[in-house]
Image (cartoon, rainbow, N blue to C red):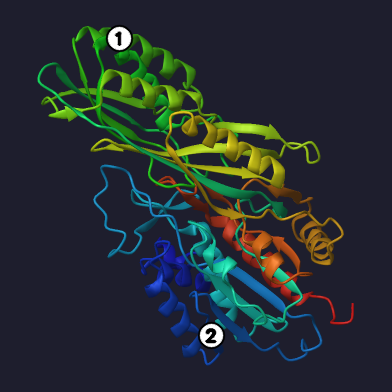
């Protein structure tokens, strides 16, 4: 069976059509035009604002004119990440999805189910002729994955809806009513490199880690390739280490899965000592990261590299960085409140750069962890810049749409949904600032390993999510309720 033959067929076909369009964050021109033309082709009022957000409105079905207007919201961009050995050009190729048992996944790349399944469902509703629904305002935002600039720059006064359904949650039995805010900490420092005239060239490779979403998956005890690589480099300090290159991680909001480095050491005795450390690391991650691979290759001697003292400084500052769950919520059991993820470590031509992302559902704690990370780099006289700060979304347990959806879920699926906040950054917090008073909720199908080439969406959960979405729209409250 092909993906396009899955049920609900219209949703999967729209998903495949969307996945044929390259849509990296900050390069969404093609997908903006795709969605714009979709709206125009269906003779719906379609508007593209100055930042590239697309708003398509559809009148209420006959008999539903007296119901509250609903905003359906998803983001157009997707995380572009692939395995190092996958030959794929995200800028020119469409995602190659396929069925793998109970799941749909992609061939060595991210799938784009985050947030493509939400976009596909909205497209299906806009094109439908026989689904009962109130007046709809479809809001397709841009650049969610690398700064949420679409939500930040959304023009005020465009939307009239009272209820917002954000279709960007990753468990089909979960309703999100709150989320974490975030801030990026970016650092840089330049070193004068030394000419290398003697020694042995070594390449270190860390790969095979699960990676994943640095918000939703930060509590799963997965390995961080940048921190693991740093442990390997530390072993080499006893062998007159000179670091020539480091290239670890790929995206600011993904747990780094791979790291590569080139170094110079004085003796191959380093390899014997390294074997012991590699065994220890693999033992530590034997349960959470069974596919962790650490390779060591002999290479030609690099021509330039950092001095031993500068190499030690780089290693020490990375060692000093907190990475993982910083604090659990005191008000919502089981919720990560505050975290930090060291996403990128780059050393090239003497330029040392890091990117990390701090998240928290408490604004003061977000600032505190960002300063904690930044201070380590200030202590080595590096440049530190905090950018892209966005607010969290405070839960409202008195939400009318929440009460409706919990009731419908129980009736349809004979079980209770999980009502909780999430540690990911959703656009709801920003949209709530732009449009105060919106009654908001986030839900979606079951997606695993987003932001990684292992991303997959559960087939049956898509149908479950779609059926719930339709039923919610049929039961939207009257305007005066």
Q: Residue at x 82, y 65 (%)?
A: 404
| Rendering coords of residue 351 (x, y %) | 30, 38
Above or below for 264 versus 404: above
Decide which of 237, 119 is in the foreground and name it.
237
Q: Quadrant of the C terminus?
A: bottom right
Q: Secondary structure at mark 1?
A: helix
Do residues under tags 1 and 2 come within 8 Å of each other at their CB atoms? Answer: no
Q: How many numbered discs, if any?
A: 2
Above or below for 278 versus 65: above
Decide which of 154, 298 is in the foreground and name it.
154
Horizontal arrangement in the rendering, residue 211 relative to residue 406 (left or right) = left
Asked if one can make out residue 7 in the rendered structure from this viewpoint, the answer is: no
| Rendering coords of residue 90 (x, y %) | 31, 59
Closer to the eye: label 1 or 2: 1
Q: Residue at x 27, y 24 (%)?
A: 295
| Rendering coords of residue 241 (x, y %) | 26, 17
Q: Residue at x 41, y 79 (%)?
A: 33
Location of mark 2 (residue):
47
Above or below for 80 versus 351: below
Q: Quadrant of the N terminus?
A: bottom left
Label 1 Cα crowd, 10 Å radius (few <14 / some 14-19 / many 20+)? some
Asked if one can make out residue 283 in the rendered structure from this viewpoint, the answer is: yes
Decide which of 64, 81 is in the foreground and name it.
81
Instruction: Determine which quarter of the picture holds residue 66.
Output: bottom right
Location of mark 1 (residue):
238
Q: Residue at x 66, y 49 (%)?
A: 180
Decide which of 351, 64 is in the foreground and name it.
351
Instruction: Determine which quarter of the picture holds residue 413.
Output: bottom right
Earlier sequence position, callout 1 versus callout 2: 2
Instruction: Determine which quarter of the picture holds residue 433.
Output: bottom right
Q: Secondary structure at mark 2?
A: strand
């Amino acid at each position: 069976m092909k993906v396009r033959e899955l049920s609900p067929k219209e949703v999967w076909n729209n998903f495949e059509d969307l996945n044929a369009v390259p849509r990296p964050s900050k390069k969404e021109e093609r997908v903006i035009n795709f969605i714009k033309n979709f709206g125009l082709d269906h003779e719906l009022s379609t508007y593209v604002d100055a930042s590239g957000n697309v708003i398509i409105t559809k009148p209420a079905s006959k008999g539903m004119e007296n119901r509250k207007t609903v905003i359906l919201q998803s983001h157009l961009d997707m995380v572009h990440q692939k395995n190092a050995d996958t030959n794929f050009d995200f800028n020119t190729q469409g995602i190659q999805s396929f069925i793998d048992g109970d799941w749909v996944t992609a061939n060595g790349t991210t799938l784009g189910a985050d947030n493509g399944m939400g976009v596909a469902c909205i497209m299906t509703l806009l094109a439908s002729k026989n689904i009962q629904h109130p007046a709809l305002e479809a809001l397709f935002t841009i650049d969610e994955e690398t700064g949420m600039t679409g939500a930040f720059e959304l023009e005020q006064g465009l939307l009239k809806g009272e209820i917002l359904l954000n279709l960007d949650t990753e468990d089909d039995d979960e309703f999100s009513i709150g989320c974490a805010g975030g801030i990026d900490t970016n650092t840089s420092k330049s070193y004068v490199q030394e000419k290398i005239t003697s020694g042995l060239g070594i390449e270190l490779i860390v790969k095979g880690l699960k990676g994943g979403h640095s918000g939703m998956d930060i509590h799963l005890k997965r390995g961080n390739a940048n921190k693991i690589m740093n442990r390997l480099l530390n072993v080499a300090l006893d062998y007159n280490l000179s670091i020539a290159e480091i290239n670890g991680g790929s995206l600011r909001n993904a747990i780094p899965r791979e790291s590569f480095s080139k170094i110079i050491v004085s003796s191959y005795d380093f390899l014997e000592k390294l074997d012991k450390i590699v065994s220890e690391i693999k033992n530590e991650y034997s349960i959470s990261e069974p596919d962790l691979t650490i390779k060591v290759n002999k290479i030609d001697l690099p021509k330039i590299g950092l001095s031993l003292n500068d190499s030690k400084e780089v290693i020490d500052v990375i060692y000093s960085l907190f990475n993982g769950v910083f604090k659990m919520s005191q008000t919502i059991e089981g919720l990560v409140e505050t975290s930090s993820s060291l996403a990128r470590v780059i050393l090239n031509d003497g330029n040392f750069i890091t990117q990390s992302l701090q998240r928290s559902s408490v604004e003061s704690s977000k600032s505190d962890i960002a300063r904690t990370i930044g201070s380590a780099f200030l202590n080595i006289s590096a440049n530190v810049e905090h950018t892209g700060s966005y607010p969290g979304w405070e839960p409202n347990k008195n939400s009318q749409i929440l009460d409706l959806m919990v009731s419908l879920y129980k009736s349809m699926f004979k079980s209770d949904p999980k009502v909780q906040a999430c540690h990911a950054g959703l656009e709801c917090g920003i949209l709530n600032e732009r449009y105060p008073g919106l009654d908001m909720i986030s839900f979606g199908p079951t997606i695993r390993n987003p932001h990684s080439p292992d991303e997959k969406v559960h087939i049956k959960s898509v149908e479950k999510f779609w059926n719930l979405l339709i039923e919610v729209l049929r039961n939207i409250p009257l305007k005066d309720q």
